[in-house]
Amino acid sequence: MLDFPRWKRFFLWAVTALCIVAAIPSLLSFTTIRWPDGVYKPMVNLGLDLAGGSHILLEADQRQLAVQRLENIEEGVRQAFDAANPEIGYSEVSTANNRLTITLENPSQVDAAREAILPLVNGTGLTREWDLDVLDGGQRMVLTPTSSGFQNAVTTAMDSATDVVRRRIDALGTREPTIIRQGDDRIVVQVPGLQDPDALKELLGQTARLEFKLLDDSPDAAALVQQGIAPAGSQIVPGARGSDYDGAVIAVRRLGGVRGDSLTAAVATRDPTNNEPAVSITFDSAGAERFARLTRENVGKQFAIILDGEVISAPVIREPILGGTSQISGGFTVAQSTQLAIALGSGALPVELTVVEERTVGPDLGAESIEAGGIAMGVGTLVLIAFMLLTYGRFGIYTNAALILNALMILGIMAVMGATLTLPGIAGFVLTIGAAVDANVLINERIREERARGRRVVQAVEAGYREASRAIFDANITNVIAALLMFFIGSGPVKGFAVVLIIGIGTSVFTAVWLTRMWVAMWLRRARPADIVL
Amino acid sequence: MKLLKLVPDNTNIRFLRWRVPFYVVSLLLMAASVGLVMTKGLNLGVDFVGGQMIRATFTQSATAPVEELRESVGSLGYGEPIIQQFGADNEISIRMRLPEGADEDPGLADQMARTITDRIEADHPDVRIDGVDSVSGKVSGELFQDGMMALGLAMLAISVYIWIRFEWQFGVGALFALLHDVTLTLGMFALTQMEFDLNIVAAILTLIGYSLNDTIVVYDRIRENLKKYRKMPIAELLDLSVNETLSRTVVTSLSVLITLLALLLLGPPVIFGFTAAITLGIFVGTYSSVYMSAPILIWLGVSGNSFVPTETAVDVQERKARGEA
C-alpha cells in the first residue's frame, strides 16, 4: 500500500498535468488573457444552446426525386427512339405507378427498341438502375426502377445536395457552419450565432431548378387549360406569386426545353428597361449551346421561364440568344433577387429539401444559461467542499483536491477531443462532481469501518481501498452502460449529456481512486500516524 | 478536531422488519403512477409530439402577459397555445401543435411560427424571442422511439450485467428497483404535468444509473456478508448489510443533492425539469435500494449458499467416501 514506485507517481502526475494544461485555453476564454497565437490550442466548443444559433435538419423529398428520375428516363427513351435508324415509333408513354410504360406502334421493332433502351437501363456502376419488362408480345415495354438503383440515386443526390447547401451557406457569409450528412436522406446544418434563421431556411428550401420551356401555342390549348386539362404533350404550370402570371396557369411543352442547372454565374442586377430587380445568368458552354438552339429554332415564339415549377415570366424570343447569357425577372424584390442569385449560382438542388426540425436559440438566452450554470456549479462545489471537509477532515482535503482536479480534467479532455459543451452537458458536469465524491465516500467509510473493527492504520487504509474498489468498479460500469446507450441512441441534448458523463466517469475513477490513494500513501509514509481522525 | 458523523457508529435500524408494509405501499404507488400516466397522460413536449415551441422574454415587464397572449395567439387560427412560465416571471414558452397538413407541406409550420412571433412583436415591442424549436411529426416519432429504446435497453443491459456479476436474483431485484424508480418518476410527471421532453429521457437514464449505484453498493455488501456469515438468517444479514452501508448512502445522497439543489435553485431555467427529475430520482432511488432491491432477495430465495459453488455428482461421491453426512 505504502509502496508507490517513482514511475507510477510520475505517470499519475503527468496525466493529470497534461489534462489540466489542455483545459487552460478554455478557461482563459472567460478572461481577457489571450492564448499565444500559433500554439496548439485545444478548446471546448460551446453548443448552440449556449452560444446561440440555429440547428436545422433537412430531409430530401424522395417522392419528388423518383418523379424526376422518371422524367429523365422518359426524355432519354424518347431521344433514343427518335435517334434510332430506322426511327422507332411509339404511340403512348405513361409514367403512372412510378414506372415508365411505352406502347410501340409496331411490335416487330421490339428488339431495336430493347437495344436502344439498354444503355439507359444500366447505370454507371455495376448496379442496374431499371428493370425492363416486355409485355403483350412486344407491344408494351415497362421500365421499373430497381431499389438499389434508386438508393444510388438518393445517395448521389444527397452528396451533391450537401455541396450545394455548403456553397449557399458560404455565400451568405455565415461563420463556421457545420454541415453533416445524416442517415440516408438528411443533412444537418448548424450555424452558430445566427440572428435570422428564416433567411437561411428560405435559401436552403429553394430548389432553384430553372427551366426554359416553350409555350403550347396550339389553338385549342387555352380552352383546355381553362378546363384544367393539359393538352397532349404539354403540362400545366402555375404562375409564381408576385409575377405577371400570379394566379394564372399556363400550358407549356413538356419536352424539348433547356434546364438551367449548369450555370457558371448568377448575379443580382436590374432590368435595364424598367429598372426592376433581376438576375443575370451565364450558361456553361454545353448549356449555352442548347439555349442558343432553342432560341434560334423558335424565334417569334413565347417561352416560359420556370423556377421551381412556377412561371416567373414568359417573354417572346425576338432573336436567337447565342452568347449564353440571359436575364430573368418576374416581379422580384431586391432581397429576392439577391437570394435567387445565390441559389442559382450555387447550383440547383438535385432534390427538394424540407426543414423537418429546427432549433434556434437567441444569443442572450445562451449567455444567461452559461452564467446561471456557472454560478450553480460554483456554489454547488463550494458547499460540497465544506461538507466533505466537515465529514472527513484530512481525508476530506484529499477528496476535495480530487474533486477539483476531476473538473479540470473533464474540461481538458473535452477540449482535446474538440467535444461540445451543451446545456445538459453542464448539468452532467455538475452531477459528475456530485457523484465523483461517491467513490471517496465509499473508500473513507470503509476505512472508518475497518478502523472500528480494530485494524491498524495502514491495514485499514489498504483494506478500505481494496474492498471499496469492487463496488466502485461495478457502479461505474453500469453508469458507462447507461451513458453509452445515451450516446449512441439518443439525439441532441441526450448526446451532449452522455459525452460529459462518459468522460466524467473515467476521470472520477482516476482522481478519486488512484490520485487520492497516492496522496494518502505518501502521507502515511511520511507522517507514520498512530491513529487517523476519520 | 471532531468530525461530522451523520450516521452514528453501530447504527442498527431493523429496516427489513417493515418490508411487507413498505412493499405494499410501493406497489400501490407504482399502480397509482401507471394509473396517472394512463388517465392524465404525460405533458409531451414538441420533441415527442411534433409542433413548435417559441421562447420569449418580456424585457420591460415584471411579468409576462400570459392571458393576453393566450387570447391573441389563439385568435390566429392555429388552435389553442399552451403557454407556460419558466424561470423568471417575464419568461414564457408558447407551445403549438403543428398546423394541419404540415406533414405534406412543412412550409406551413414555418409560416405559423413567423405569424405568431410577428404578432407578439407587434403587440409587445419589448419582447425578445429567445428561441424557436420546431419538430415535424416524422422526426418527433423517431425521437420518441429512440428515447424509449434507450431507456428499455439501458435497464435491460444493466440488469444483465448485475446478473453476470452477482446472481440471477440480484439481476431481477435490480431490474425491479429500476422499474419502481422509473414508474414513480413518470407518475410524478403525469401528476405535475411538467413538460416531458428529450431532456427528461436523459434525466431518467441518469437516475437509473445512480439508483443502481446505490443498489450495487448494498448488493456488494450483501454478497460479502453472505460469504462471511453463512449461518446468519437472511433477513438479519440484509439488515446488517444495509446498516453497514447506511453512512455511505446518506453522505453520497447528500453530496449529489447539494449539487442538484444548486442547479435547481440557481441554474438555468431551461433545464429545470431535467434537474427536478434527477432530484426526485435521488430520493426514490435511495429508498428503492433499501426497500425494493434488498427484500426481494428474501422472496427470491437468496441464502448463505448462493455464492457457494454448486455440488457436482463427483463432489457428492467424495463427500460420502470421506464418511461425511
Image (cartoon, coloured by chain):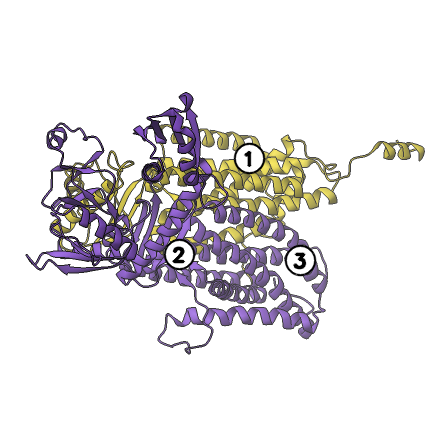
Picture disc at residue A133:
none
Distance (Cα) linking label 2 and label 3: 37 Å
Question: Depth-wise, is mark 1 or mark 2 nearer the camera?
Answer: 2
At x 47%, y 32%, the residue is B30
Above or below residue B111? Residue A360 is below
Report helix, strand or loop for mark 2. loop
Q: Which chain is yellow?
A: B
Residue closer to the observer: A16 or A282? A282
In the rendered image, residue B113, in percent from the top left (x then y), is placed at 22, 45
Q: Residues within 10 Å of mark 1 (few under 14, many from 20)?
A: some
- The residue singled out by tag 1 in the image is B176
Nearer the viewer's eye, disc 3 or disc 1?
1
Instruction: Tell me the crowding category of disc 2: few under 14, some 14 to 19, or many 20 or more residues within 10 angstroms, Cα based.
Output: many
Answer left or right for B140 relative to B52.
right
A227 vs A430, left or right, is left
Q: Residue at x 35, y 61 (%)?
A: A370
The answer as to whether the residues below labels 1 and 2 share one chain is no
Across and down, in percent, residue A249 comes to 14, 36
Marks 2 and 3 belong to one chain? yes
For residue A464, which numbered disc appears in the image?
A: 3
Task: Tell me which chain the residue with mark 3 is part of.
Answer: A
Give the percent coordinates (x, y) of residue B123.
12, 49
What is the chain identity of the residue bearing mark 1? B
Extreme bottom residue here? A36
Q: Mark 2 vs mark 3: which is more N-terminal?
A: 2
The chain in purple: A
Could you tell me the amino acid type at mark 3? Answer: Gly
Q: Residue at label 2?
A: A422
Q: The disc numbered 2 marks a residue on which chain?
A: A
Counting from the top left corner in percent of width and height, residue B179 is at 51, 36
